[in-house]
Amino acid sequence: MWGRVVEIMTAVWLAASPFIFDAASDGIVLWSDLGVALLIWVLSGLSYWPPTRRAHLLILVVAVGLVLWGRLAVLPPTPVHQNHIVVGLFLLMIAVIPNNASQPPSGWMEHRAEVQ
């Protein structure tokens, strides 16, 4: 479930980014980034629970929203909004990784058991 860990680390980056990009004085950016980071963190965490193991796919919607907000908020995008675009695109890549990506394929494990 390394993909979920990377999503949680990305949420931490998103929560810290208003302070790094000196946008903490803008309340909308600060609270939006903190809220989106919390949402990413919750969705990634829910993916560890078997009944909600596909909750991380909702991060795709959040990521598209980040990209659109970063691109359309101000023209040309400021550094904090460029960060939203990059984080959104990164999350689009990571969110599609299945939870069991680190495990060998089930067919391979069955074949291995037959051989032994």
Image: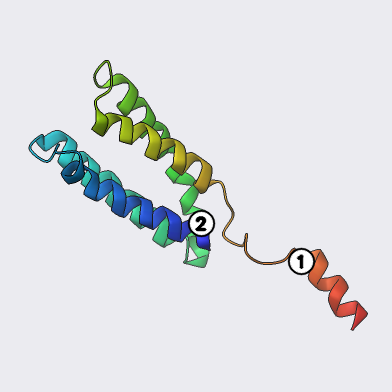
Residue 16 spot, x, y in % from top left: 22, 50
What residue is shown at x 47% (from left), y 53% (from top)?
55
Q: Is residue 115 above or below residue 55?
A: below
Look at mark 1 in the image and give the residue it sits on. 106
Crowding at label 1, few (<14), some or many (≥20) Cα neighbours within 10 Å? few
Using the image, tell me which numbered label, if any, was put on residue 2.
none
Which of the marked residues, 2 or 1, is nearer the chain's N terminus? 2
Crowding at label 2, few (<14), some or many (≥20) Cα neighbours within 10 Å? many
Using the image, tell me which numbered label, if any, was put on residue 3.
2
What residue is shown at x 16% (from left), y 45% (from top)?
19
Q: How many marks?
A: 2
- Residue 60 visible within the image: no
Q: Which tag is nearer the camera, tag 2 or tag 1?
A: 2
Indicate left or right for 63 with 78 as reference. right
Residue 66 spot, x, y in % from top left: 35, 34
Indicate left or right for 32 with 43 as reference. left
Indicate left or right for 2 with 21 as reference. right
Residue 24 occupies quadrant: top left
Residue farthest along the bottom direction in this orientation: 116
Residue 94 spot, x, y in % from top left: 51, 47
Residue 105 spot, x, y in % from top left: 75, 63
